[in-house]
Image (cartoon, coloured by chain):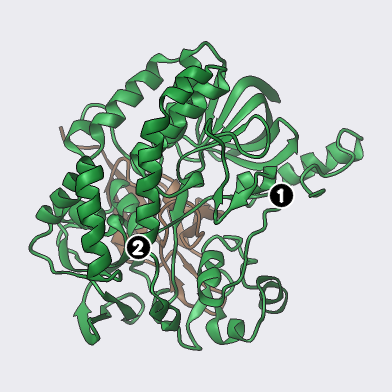
Amino acid sequence: MQPEVLSITINGKPLSVPAGTSVAAAMLMAGEPCRHSVTGEPRAPLCGMGICMECRVTVNGLPHQRSCQLLCASGMEVVTE
Amino acid sequence: MSAHFDIFVAGAGPGGIAAAVTAAESGKRVCLLDANPTPGGQIWRGLRLETARNYPHGAEFAAWQSRLAASSVEILPNTQVVDQAAPNRLRVELESGSETQTTDIEFNRLILATGARERFLPFPGWTLPGVMGAGGAQALVKSGLDPRGKRVVLAGTGPLLLAVAASFARAGAKIEGIFEQAPLSRLASFALRTMLTHPGKFTEGARYRLKTLSAAYRCNSWVKRAEGRGRVESVTVTIAGKERTIPCDWLACAWHLVPNLDLPRLIGCKIDSGYVAVDALQQSSIPNVFCIGELTGIGGLEKALIEGQIAGHAAANREAEARALAPHRRSQQNFAQQLDQTFALRPELRTLPTGQTIVCRCEDVRHSALAACTSWRQAKLHTRCGMGPCQGRICGPAAEFLYNWQSADSRPPIFPARVSTLAASADEASAGQITQCPTASR
């Protein structure tokens, strides 16, 4: 059985991922940083377990979502912070 | 909203599941809470009953997951403890969809199974996208990250390096090298002792190595720096004194684990040499508060399962059953001590950061700024180190290692909380329900 495929957008660009993919995994596969640090460095997931807060993204307009703790949902709009 | 239980278990990894199931099977009303959507913790993350047997530790997962499903344990997923509202009452935030609810859980007995997180050490380039914790990288792969064709370097220390390398290789990544900082002599004696005392674990390690034979495994070697534009493109390691630069897509680092002590500290449990001090029944210095698994010593799955069962029995007043498991516990505690000794960090790792290297990633505080401080408190006040969203969970253990500071403190809320949650606490205080913050009096 093929896994269900979901469509999301990352910084406006469409991406298809299998159902069950976390937003953090999707960001890494898209090669997009999750956030920019206070001095402007690009940052991506580090701990993968909801602790380091490096994977914060804006999801459907809601800022500071930990992308490693969040699963992709159809139509989700994810934006780098 | 609030609820009352005989036993409240915080953390649904293997230890928390074993504790909750054991207590519930004795007829107690048990609640099992976890921040993640499903029970299993880190080691069992993403496993499903149907396919679990194909994975390492899948058999244990299947057995405990089945017992959990058949038990009366009430599971509270997507939930984070933020404060101790009163003795025997914890304040939690529940996420459901985009909604966050605040509620209090009351209990007679508390079992803490909050596990461990990875220790991170700063080195030049460690903030580049693509540099991850080894356990973190594995968690990301379990949640859909596709490693096929990716060139992965693993560096750091401990059995996690091999385990993660094996799971990456199995998922189709190209392992470009495994670099273990511990010296060969310590590894050899560890391997020999493990073979004699814990043959199952030895076989597991050997199996991981067999799966990664095409990649070099070097001891006495560690990462010096990562480089790249906008993401990691290469890693320079030192191998027995010689530097080598390896192109890669991802660098997975493992510097052993540190226990998540925020909740035990908040409640006031005595900490001894970095772990919660417990008696033979896993009870901490606070009566009716039990601590298990990585909180009492980094030992992995088997130790967590045994200690979880001991705490589950003890919390359900079945002391004889709890004491019957003592020999197993002793054996697992010995293994935990051997891990700590074998994979102790070498002093050279303190020299990795340059002045420009960021130590606190939340606030971008650099090594040069911190080296000018004399304590964790001074660093916080002068540089904002440890005061960002992770609240020192990443830079705290790093600063302990680099500067010999004690970063230990725990204040409510122990996790970033909604303003509405804080407002609820404030309302209670002004209504006279709480006259004094219960955790501020220590």
Furthest toward the top, the residue is: B27
Quarter of the image containing the N terminus of chain B? top right
Closer to viewer: mark 1 or mark 2: 2
Q: Nearer the viewer, residue B49 or B438?
A: B438
Give coordinates of residue B82: x percent, y percent.
Answer: 65, 44
Secondary structure found at label 2: loop
Amino acid found under the numbered disc labelled 1 = Pro
Q: Nearer the viewer, residue A27 or B249?
A: B249
Chain of the residue on which disc 2 is drawn: B
The mark that comes first in sequence, 1 or 2, is 2
Which residue is labeled 2 in the image? B343
Report the chain shown in brown.
A
Mark 1 falls on what kind of element?
loop
The residue singled out by tag 1 in the image is B412
Residue at x-position 63% and y-position 60%: B408
Left or right for B87, reference B387:
right
Q: Quadrant of residue B285?
A: top right
Q: Are marks 1 and 2 on the same chain?
A: yes
Subunit bearing disc 1:
B
The residue sitting at 38% across, 60% down in the picture is B341
Within 10 angstroms of label 1, few (less than 14), some, or many (20 or more) residues? many
Q: Write down the colour of chain B.
A: green
Q: Residue at x 53, y 30 (%)?
A: B281
Residue A42 spot, x, y in % from top left: 44, 73
